[in-house]
Amino acid sequence: MATHNKPVSIDGSMFKHSGAWFGLFSRNFPETAFFLGTCRGMAALAPDKNRLIDIFPTFNGEKVAYTIDARPAELTLVTERGNVRFTFADLTKLLAEGDAGMGLRFEKTMVQHESVHPRKDGAWEAFFRMTSAFIFKGLNGSGFNFNDGKTPWVWEKLSSDKIFGATTPAPDGTFTLVLEEFTYGGAVRDSYPDYAEAKAAMQLAWDGFIEALPTFSAPFGDNLDEAVYRLWTFLTAPSGTAKYPMIQMFAGVMASQWQMCQNAVALQEHIDLAVDLMLGPIDRQGPLGQLADIYDDISFESQMLKPPVHGWAVKEIMKNHDLIAETSREKIELLYSGMGKWGDWFMNYRDEDGDGLPSVVHSDETGLDDSTLFREHIQITTPDLAAYLVILFEATGDLAKILGKPESEISAWYKKSTDLLKRLTDELWDGEHFVGLVPGTREKIFSKSVEHYIPAILGKRLPANIINKLADDLTESFLSPWGLASEALDSEYFTSEGFGKGCVIPPVMTFICTGLWETERRDTARLFAERYCKALAADGKFPFFIDAKDGSGLYFGCSWSNCAYVILARLLSE
């Protein structure tokens, strides 16, 4: 197995082991900071969010300037005096070691109910409000303590208040430190892993993960390590109320349910993981069939929702994988049942005018939050929702087929798909565009939002004349040198500030390109995808937003853009 050890960026992101719920964070805005941080959901309620405690390298006890060299299995703080290195032994243990004279200092003003206190064998424990406990312990002859070994406590504040932790060197001047996370109170262990062995194991885990992905053609393979590393490190293992693996959108911010599906497609070579990412939202499905927008190890947000793209994900994965042979039947049964209920929820509870076309009740539900389609109405029957459901019902039929369900059950799902497709093309296609309808009044709405073109996701299911019109309009009005804008380039409402009003964003590129790829307009899809992938990988930054007018990026350290890159680069490498 090859060793993948290219430098990776953690600017605005994090260094951690795949599956872990904590890591090392680096950011330069609003202030420069390097800190131990958490990905746990309760952190949203804590005063410092996911920032647990700041970290500084020292030489002979004094802070020194540093730069960060991050590799998938090791992060190094590089100074003129020597270096400090970090690696993970497993999902709960972070190890650090320093050259002779080097050390680490940890600082924080603890909030109410947060405290540090000594434990046995020279260890110390820190309670971080709402999130986790950590054991700090020096290893291999080195030591560690908080506040020079004096237990800090301010009764009036019910906390340890201002704390500083520091390593103490072993006889040879070096140090080794372990930080272990606990979701309950911590425990001091009799022994801990060796640093070199931990690093080797972390490297092996990373190498095995990336080696499973296909080889991408030039130039897209040149940036594969950077893109996949962010997906790998943003994954979190089952914990708390989360029974399945999940993935973060930003460092410390959980991805929404439709992003779980998109990441499943990106990581489909790890088929069990891909299926688990789709099952996570289904595990918390509401009694009527609705899926929550966002969930984590503690809570979920069910008053909002995101588009039903489970079907699209299943269809994309099934192009390359025999699900019934490659994963458990039990998981496929859960996926089949959950997807069916999710699709039926829209038809049963979001079609109150009975026209057979479901509506959304807030622009957020389209995933293009500030779409100009919603300038005058909040409830709209949108063409993108119908398109997503056409694929979802078809994919549910596909799952029914491989599970050996009765023919009547299989055909019922396919009929739901074809009936909805007919209503989409009969009622929402006006001969030139897909339009929105105002429920009740049947008023037709057309804006300059790319939302009208998301039905391109349907690919060859649409008549050739419709596909050609969609592809031509997108090329003429939305295509920038960096990909498709979310609002027409000549729109009076165009702005790079909003999510759905002009910037180039991952879901638009992913859905439109994968749909057109199946049609006679594959060359058009290739043009779109090549421009976007090259823009994402420029300087290795993978921005979340790309300004469609000048190509500048915004919001770095987001897994979503890396996910889109892997999906589209896979297509371009076929």
Image (tube, rainbow, N blue to C red):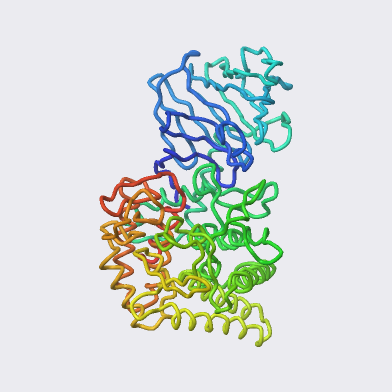
In the image: residue 462, left or right of residue 94: left
Tell me the quadrant of the picture where the C terminus can be found. bottom left
Q: How many marks?
A: 0
Residue sitting at x 50%, y 63%: 265
Residue sitting at x 52%, y 22%: 104
Residue sitting at x 41%, y 41%: 9
Q: Position of residue 218 (x, y in %)?
A: 31, 59
In the image: residue 27, left or right of residue 196: left
Residue placed farthest to the bottom in the image? 408
Q: Is residue 458 above or below residue 234?
A: below
Q: Is residue 151 above or below residue 37?
A: above
In the image: residue 168, left or right of residue 130: left
Q: Position of residue 64 (x, y in %)?
A: 42, 19
- Towards the viewer: 144 or 113: 113
Question: Do we see residue 566 in this rendering?
Answer: no
Residue sitting at x 51%, y 44%: 203
- Towards the viewer: 78 or 371: 371
